[in-house]
Amino acid sequence: MQLEGKVAVVTGGSLGIGAGVARRLAAEGAAVALDYYSHRDAADGVAASITAAGGKALVVQADVAQVADVQRLISQAVSRFGRLDILVNNAGVEQPAPFESVTEQQWDHQIAVDLKGAFFAAQAAWRQFVAQGGGGVIINISSVHEELPMVGNSVYCAAKGGLRMLTRTLASEVARHNVRIVNIGPGAIATPINQITLDDPARKAALLSEIPLKRIGTPEDIANAVVWLASDQASYVTGTSLFVDGGLMIYAGSL
Ligand code: BGC
């Protein structure tokens, strides 16, 4: 076990990548606080599977778009488990729409969940890291679309591009207390966020044609990267992005 005695918070831990990450961090020995926005049963199911396997889990309802909620999430995790070592900013939404039809509400919602939420969760985690004497890691689940343009998905790309610069900027600010911040850029992963694509044979085939490794990724593929980045094995890694995408970004970028 690589994370024995550590405490982690995973936002959006009830479904998809977040659920896989929460389970895997717990399997590596971390106590895990996971938040959900609306899928309470799913979050309880993740926590139950963690505790059934002998791990520690806490479920918190929180809307990461609300700063007070992310601050409460971090403080509840610390109250329960005594400290904080790892924050995984995973919660995200994606509402593709042609540029000309994007509404103010769609813009505000995606930016609030995908970018603002990650920023203020990082800030709350940072304050806790400093208060307990330094050390800690912040992992943002970004996307290949922090770098790769996607037609018809401008707001999501803007949010993920924002995460890219956020991590590069904050890395220098937080390093003085030995805190690391990194992005993981998943490609196409089998989760609810892209269920519509995966359920459509033509769209799925088009997507697979752009993935050199010729498979859709799994939450476990991302969880493996999270464990490594959260561990001391990655103690010299900060301010950068690790793409876990079967080669999608490089290949699609060369089309
Ligand atoms: C999106 C998916 C998309 C994938 C590859 C992800 O960030 O959430 O919907 O399939 O990028 O383009």
Image: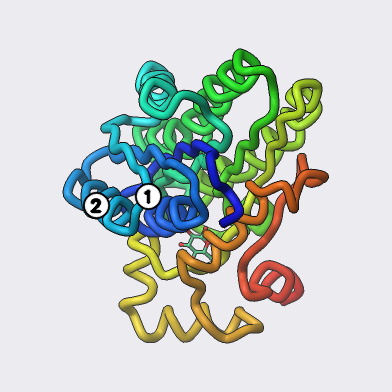
Name the kind of residue labelled 2 in the image.
Answer: Ala
From what the image shows, is residue 145 above or below residue 121? below
**Mark 2 burial class by Cα count in 10 Å: few <14, some 14-19, many 20+:** some
- For the residue labelled by badge 2, is the local secondary structure a helix, a strand or a loop? helix
Residue at 66 percent across and 59 percent down: it is 148
Q: Residue 11's spot in the image, x, y percent?
A: 42, 40
Total residue callouts: 2
Is 40 placed left or right of 11 in the picture? Answer: left
State which mark lies toward you, 1 or 2.
1
In the picture, the quarter occupied by the C terminus is bottom right
Q: Which residue is mark 2?
A: 48
Name the spot of residue 231 as percent of width and height, x first: 66, 49
Residue 183 at x, y = what percent? 65, 47
- Give the alpha-carbon distance from disc 1 to disc 2, as whole Å: 9 Å
Answer with the quarter of the image where residue 211 lies: bottom right
Q: Is residue 32 left or right of residue 174?
A: left
Q: Which residue is mark 1?
A: 55
Image position of 160 with respect to 149: above or below = above
| Amino acid identity at mark 1 | Gly
For label 1, the SS is loop
Tell me the residue at 76%/28% (across/down).
178
